[in-house]
Amino acid sequence: MNDFQIKILILSFIATVAMGILTIPILKKLKIGQIEREDGPESHLNKQGTPTMGGIILIASIAILIVFVFFRYAKNEIELAKKLIPLAIMSLGFGVIGFIDDLKKLVFRNTKGLKPAYKMLGLLGVAVIYVIYLIKVIDLGTDTYIPILKISINLPVWIYIPFSIFVILGTTNAINLTDGVDGLCPTISAIIITCLTVIGIIYDVKEVVIFGTIVIGSCLGFLLFNMHPAKVFMGDTGSLLLGGVIVAIALYLKIPLLLIIIALIPVLETLSVILQVLYFKRTGNRIFKMAPLHHHFELSGWGENKVVSVFSIITLILCIIGLMTI
């Protein structure tokens, strides 16, 4: 990482902290507070009313830094600056969809938020645009790296497009489900994005390194407000944004299958929900005390900090393993 990238990391961190200091009082004043599930862990009931929709802090700080970096590189390296655009559109696009969902739920008091069909349509639209942009505009190709085997295979376009869209929607949903314990989602996301950024350094893909560095700085800044006990929650605005960042970078680097390893915790969170629902419908009983998985451990006696620590350590180990497969 060169000096400029270190400066970007620090600037991103500072911008996020500044946005947090400015935004959280406004969210409190507008009474945009967390609505806890009645069937959720009892310990979470005291979080009722904590400001949420804090993902706008991440959206604002990331957007500001991307604009700053774009104009910085537009002077001498315009092609590099242009390559930041699809990564930004994909990630911020998902964040905006999450923002609309949060807005309906928390500001307009529509408890259901954005209709699932509309939400999926929005995510699908952004995903399709991103995948087609990679193939048609920047001609990235359809070759996909298979970790462990350390080979790349060329997928036919008619397989690559639906496969990529499935990975995008699946990853975003998995990161979204990980957001349920103070500090868990931004910590897990920061570790995964750091791993992807390191791979960007190994592959010498500068736009990924720059973009990843911006988001890592923002995650670290947001954590100052989101660590237990959280002063603000990110809501769907933040979790969909971070899901978009992770999958956008993974597809850009042609390593979406690596997410099975490095993002195993979000994958397990998703599987726990699917298994819980299917098993309950079939037998009327539950496999886990509560799904997603982090709630099961909470109800087993783990504190929120322990859940975050253990899940983060596991993710860090998985990311090291993932790097060894490159």
Image (tube, grey):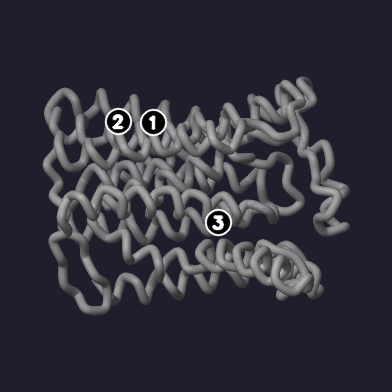
From the image, tell me which residue sits under label 1: 65
Q: Amino acid at mark 3?
A: Thr
Q: Would residue 133 be visible to someone looking at this image?
A: yes
Q: Is residue 279 left or right of residue 189?
A: right
126 above or below 307?
above
Distance from the alpha carbon under mark 2 to that under mark 1: 6 Å
- Which residue does the numbered mark 2 point to in the structure image? 69
Question: Quarter of the image containing the C terminus?
Answer: bottom left
Mark 2 nearby-residue class (10 Å; few <14, some 14–19, many ≥20): some
Which residue is pictured at 71% across the width and 34% down the height? 112
Tell which circle, 3 or 2, labels the residue nearer the N-terminal end: 2
The residue beneath circle 3 is 187
Mark count: 3
Which quadrant of the figure has residue 90?
Answer: top left
Q: Is residue 241 above or below residue 100?
A: below
| Left or right: 223, with 12 as reference point | right
Neighbour class for label 1 at 10 Å: few (<14), some, many (≥20)?
many
